[in-house]
């Protein structure tokens, strides 16, 4: 088991290098002048060149990449062109906020999706199954930015129960786990949880239905286990795959929340990414993408390790 | 004495007119008025080809069939208990406590993500309320009983870490962990290598004698059935067509289907001659013919065979065949005996 974990960790190193290369390249391939947001439109050619030199944009791409990678390894992602603040601390704050949102949404989605999926799979073809399946299909299909706006209209504008935007009273950016702050979390988290809920529910339903068809379930009943005993076996058999799906969903939510974070003005990575793109803030964009990509790699690692410790058959791989 | 079944109160199993229908259009008649008894410590071999209803009969004794799809009628009493009326906890106590089952393919019948030890212990905890340690100790004892080498380490193994023969031994250990009075074996050697088959059969017979259980052994292999059984029942298209002691059925089969099965056996065949295979295939269970289900394949079928009910020939408590010819043949012999 330990050697498996070590080997798996070693595998991630080349992946991480490749990821950083791709994210550097992507940002630099895209058209547009990186300094357009801070230079006046009538800036002289000298001034432009001077600024290019300050930010290092005048050097060759391999040189820029190595310099950027070297600094990134030391935790320095450069400074934002738009604000001049260090990218690392901007991203760090945003990541914290996104984590809060994404993890909350994943937990809600996983619990509800797991429950719906399990019940649907267990009582396959019953009305409960049809209801749960309908909910999960709607969950996967509905555009979540639209759902977010509908939620804002209902719960903030009409009912005035919950705040519509932001991550704390008075635009506070320091997150605290109290009701004052948490009421800002509810709408975006619930909106976001609809996607993993649908996907997890469908996966778990298929899993449970498949497991119940297998002969060992007859074997469990044949040795006299009560329904709850059989359930425990079904859950343990379904868990590795369900966890893998949840891990991937968490990964998607960590990066893919631009729309929801924008709708709710939630100061997370998606919001930051949106800003960086619109302002052509290359260091900020690069840094954010890198951090998000790293999250994905690490998350996959954790999911693999968790799956292996749950399913003994994978250890030989 | 119309039925030829014993009415002894000593029976471990008493099955009367058991029928199983699976929902469908038309419904599938998987088991058709099967009746038999089994004495404690007796081994009954049910012989038949694939799809003849052997496994369904076994599963009915444990009520393992999906309740929404299967309609069961008739009487099933095991150890004085009316099995068909059991529900909930009573049914769960019956399964594994009084009746256990060994499945055909142990690689499918064991939970892949639990260790062998856990799976055996779970049964002991469920039925005897034992502590975890005691249950594990019993699991170890059982693995030693079925002669799994280095049993202590094997407790920690997952099913995929064992060979097919070892897995089937573990399955037997699991089935016997709570000392059931009846063991149901559903082709337990079919998925194994020939050499391992013999070991498992010998082990089963030995354990059966040691523990004095009743056993119903389902197989399509005549050699295997003869090896382990006291009594044989030949099953065709969901019905028992002939039953008797192993010796009687093998030496003097009365039903044409039993004769056909025996003739198609490799053992005792003369090299270089053709095996007498039974022509054709069994009828679909959702469209059984009127009268004898075997008539369409039977070499000696006549018009009388197409009339229900098929007459029963019986000779003593546990020796009978359901066939027009068996009945007539016996009557002729009787007349000849009387004439002398």
Image (tube, helix red, strand yellow):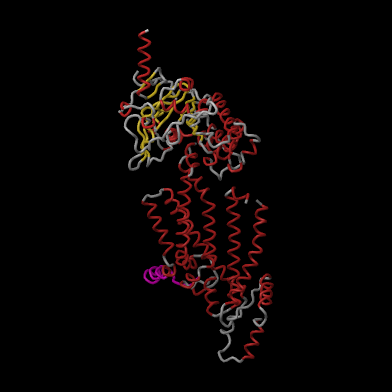
Q: Position of residue A292 (x, y in %)?
A: 58, 68
Q: Which residue occupies the foreground of this view, B197 or A14?
A: B197
Q: Is residue A150 magenta?
A: yes
Q: Which residue occupies the foreground of this view, A213 or B269?
A: B269
Q: Which residue occupies the foreground of this view, A260 or B218?
A: B218
**Residue at the outermost front position:** B272
Q: Position of residue A61 (x, y in %)?
A: 66, 77
**Residue at the outermost top position:** B340
Q: Which residue occupies the foreground of this view, B245 or A118?
A: B245
Residue at 58% across / 33% down in the picture?
A: B194
Q: Quadrant of residue B29?
A: top left
Residue at 45% across / 64% down in the picture?
A: A190
Q: Is residue A199 magenta?
A: no
In the image, B127: left or right of B8? right
Image mark count: 0
Q: Is residue A161 above or below residue B301?
A: below
Q: Quadrant of residue A301?
A: bottom right
Residue B224 can be seen in this image = no
Q: Which residues are magenta?
A: A149-168
Q: Quadrant of residue B254?
A: top left
Residue B273 can be seen in this image = yes
Q: Is residue B25 above or below residue B221?
A: below
Q: Position of residue A58 (x, y in %)?
A: 66, 83
Q: Is residue A167 above or below residue A51?
A: above
Q: Position of residue A237 (x, y in %)?
A: 52, 48
The N terminus of chain B lies in which quarter of the figure? top left
The C terminus of chain B lies in which quarter of the figure? top left
């Amino acid at each position: 088991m330990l050697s498996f974990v070590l080997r798996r960790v070693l595998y991630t190193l080349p992946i991480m290098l490749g990821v950083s290369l791709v994210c550097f390249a992507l940002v630099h391939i895209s058209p547009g002048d990186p300094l357009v947001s801070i230079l006046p439109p009538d800036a002289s050619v000298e001034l432009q060149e001077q600024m290019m030199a300050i930010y290092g944009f005048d050097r060759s791409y391999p040189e820029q990449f190595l310099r950027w990678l070297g600094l990134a390894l030391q935790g320095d992602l450069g400074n934002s062109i738009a604000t001049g603040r260090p990218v690392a601390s901007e991203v760090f704050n945003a990541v914290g906020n996104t984590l809060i949102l994404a993890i909350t949404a994943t937990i809600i989605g996983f619990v509800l999706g797991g429950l719906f999926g399990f019940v649907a799979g267990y009582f396959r073809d019953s009305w409960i199954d049809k209801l749960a399946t309908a909910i999960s299909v709607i969950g996967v299909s509905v555009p979540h930015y639209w759902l977010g706006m509908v939620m804002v209209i209902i719960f903030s504008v009409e009912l005035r129960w919950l705040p519509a935007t932001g991550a704390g009273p008075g635009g506070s950016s320091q997150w605290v786990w109290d009701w004052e702050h948490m009421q800002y979390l509810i709408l975006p988290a619930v909106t976001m949880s609809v996607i993993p809920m649908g996907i997890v529910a469908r996966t778990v339903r298929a899993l449970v239905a498949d497991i119940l068809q297998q002969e060992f379930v007859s074997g469990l009943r044949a040795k006299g286990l009560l329904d709850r005993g059989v359930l425990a076996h079904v859950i343990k058999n379904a868990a590795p795959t369900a966890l893998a799906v949840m891990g991937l969903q968490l990964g998607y939510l960590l990066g893919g929340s631009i729309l929801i974070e924008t709708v709710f003005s939630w100061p997370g990575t998606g919001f930051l990414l949106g800003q960086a793109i619109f302002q052509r803030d290359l260091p900020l964009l690069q840094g954010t993408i890198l951090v998000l990509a790293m999250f994905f790699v690490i998350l996959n690692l954790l999911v693999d390790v968790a799956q292996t410790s749950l399913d003994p058959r994978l250890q030989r791989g | 004495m119309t039925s030829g079944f014993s009415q002894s109160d000593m029976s471990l199993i008493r099955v009367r007119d058991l029928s199983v229908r699976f929902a469908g259009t038309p419904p599938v008649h998987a088991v058709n008025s099967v009746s038999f008894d089994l004495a404690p410590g007796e081994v009954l071999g049910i012989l038949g080809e694939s799809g003849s209803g052997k496994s369904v009969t076994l599963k009915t004794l444990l009520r393992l069939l999906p309740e929404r799809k299967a309609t069961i009628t008739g009487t099933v009493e095991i150890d004085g208990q009316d099995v068909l009326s059991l529900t909930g906890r009573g049914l769960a106590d019956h399964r594994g406590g009084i009746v256990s089952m060994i499945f055909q393919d142990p690689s499918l019948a064991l939970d892949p993500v639990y260790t062998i030890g856990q799976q055996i212990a779970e049964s002991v905890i469920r039925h005897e309320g034992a502590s975890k340690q005691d249950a594990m100790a019993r699991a170890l004892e059982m693995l030693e009983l079925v002669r799994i080498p280095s049993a202590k380490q094997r407790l920690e193994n997952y099913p995929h870490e064992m060979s097919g023969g070892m897995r089937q031994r573990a399955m037997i250990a699991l089935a016997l962990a709570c000392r059931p009075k009846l063991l149901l074996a559903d082709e337990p050697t079919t998925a194994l290598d020939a050499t391992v088959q013999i070991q498992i059969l010998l082990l089963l017979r030995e354990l059966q004698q040691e523990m004095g259980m009743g056993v119903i052994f389902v197989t399509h292999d005549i050699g295997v059935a003869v090896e382990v059984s006291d009594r044989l029942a030949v099953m065709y298209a969901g019905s028992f067509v002939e039953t008797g002691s192993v010796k009687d059925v093998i030496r003097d089969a009365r039903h044409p289907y039993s004769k056909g099965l025996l003739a198609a056996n490799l053992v005792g065949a003369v090299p270089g001659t053709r095996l007498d295979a039974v022509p054709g295939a069994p009828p679909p269970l959702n469209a059984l013919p009127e009268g004898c289900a075997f008539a369409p394949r039977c070499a000696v079928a006549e018009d009388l065979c197409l009339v229900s009910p098929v007459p029963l020939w019986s000779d003593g408590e546990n020796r009978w065949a359901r066939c027009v010819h068996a009945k007539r043949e016996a009557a002729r012999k009787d007349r000849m005996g009387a004439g002398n």
